[in-house]
Image (spheres, rainbow, N blue to C red):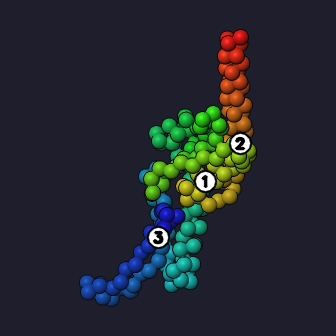
Amino acid sequence: MSNHHHVVRIDIEPSEDGARRSSTHGWQVRVSHNGQRKTKFFADRKYGGRETALQLAIEHRDKLLAERPAPSGPTERRAQKRSTSGVAGVRLAFKSGTPYIEANWVNGEGRSVTSYSVERWGLRKATWRACRSRAQGLGVRDPERVQSMFDVAYPTLQNSLDVALAKRNGKEHASEAQEA
């Protein structure tokens, strides 16, 4: 149920106190931003059953999340500062001298990090995969949102990688010159 964040199941049966009340079964979407909460209920009966109501609720949630402005709180600003891509949570990293594109996010399951080797995937595919992983980790399923993340990240990461490799090559040449 990890992809159901912001979507909760509501199952209410009539009780002795409210015997006249009808039962309520469905999914409620709850998305908050800057102190404002948007909610919508998707009743099983109205939307053709439990699974169909869930799918519609997830689609609605994804639409609300895609419309939400980029987070600007302290956590997101810190992530943006560390970002070498222009996209919070997507950055260039090096592991044992090998360049990777790293994606990280925090959701209901905690903090997650994944990385894609530039040597294995190439910069374009590694960047795309990182953007897609971050979006999916945050529950965003909108391909246009992933594409816009990629459009910002790829040229910036390409430049960052060129600069990092030039610095690295400069240091290697400097150390070779000192040895000679």
Q: Residues within 10 Å of mark 2 (few under 14, many from 20)?
A: few
What residue appears at the point 60 percent right and 44 percent down from the top-left corner?
A: 102
**In the image, what residue type sits under mark 2?**
Glu
Q: Is residue 146 left or right of residue 88?
A: right
Mark 1 vs mark 2: which is more N-terminal?
Answer: 2
Find residue 117 and report its horizontal and vertical position in percent.
Answer: 66, 44
Residue at 57%, 49% (x, y): give it: 114
- Tell us which disc is closer to us: 2 or 3: 2
What is the secondary structure assignment of the residue under circle 2? helix
The residue identified by callout 1 is: 133
**Residue in view at x 61 percent, y 40 percent:** 91
Judge left or right: residue 12 versus residue 137: left
Q: Position of residue 85 (x, y in %)?
A: 64, 39
Labels 1 and 2 touching (C-beta < 8 A): no
Position of the C terminus by quadrant: top right
Q: Amino acid at mark 1?
A: Ser
The circle drawn on residue 119 is 2
Q: Amino acid at mark 3?
A: Gln
Upstream in sequence: badge 2 or badge 3:
3
* Nearest to N terminus: mark 1 or mark 3: 3
Pick out the residue farthest to the bottom: 20
SS at mark 3 in the image: strand
- Tell me which residue sits at (51%, 50%) in the image: 112
Q: Nearer the viewer, residue 158 or 69?
A: 158
State yes or no: discs 1 and 3 in contact (Cβ < 8 Å). Answer: no
Q: Which mark is residue 28?
A: 3
Q: Secondary structure at mark 1?
A: helix
What is the number of the mark on residue 177? Answer: none
- Circle 3 residues within 10 Å: few <14, some 14–19, many ≥20: many
Asked if residue 110 can be seen in this view, the reply is yes
167 sits left or right of 83 in the view? right
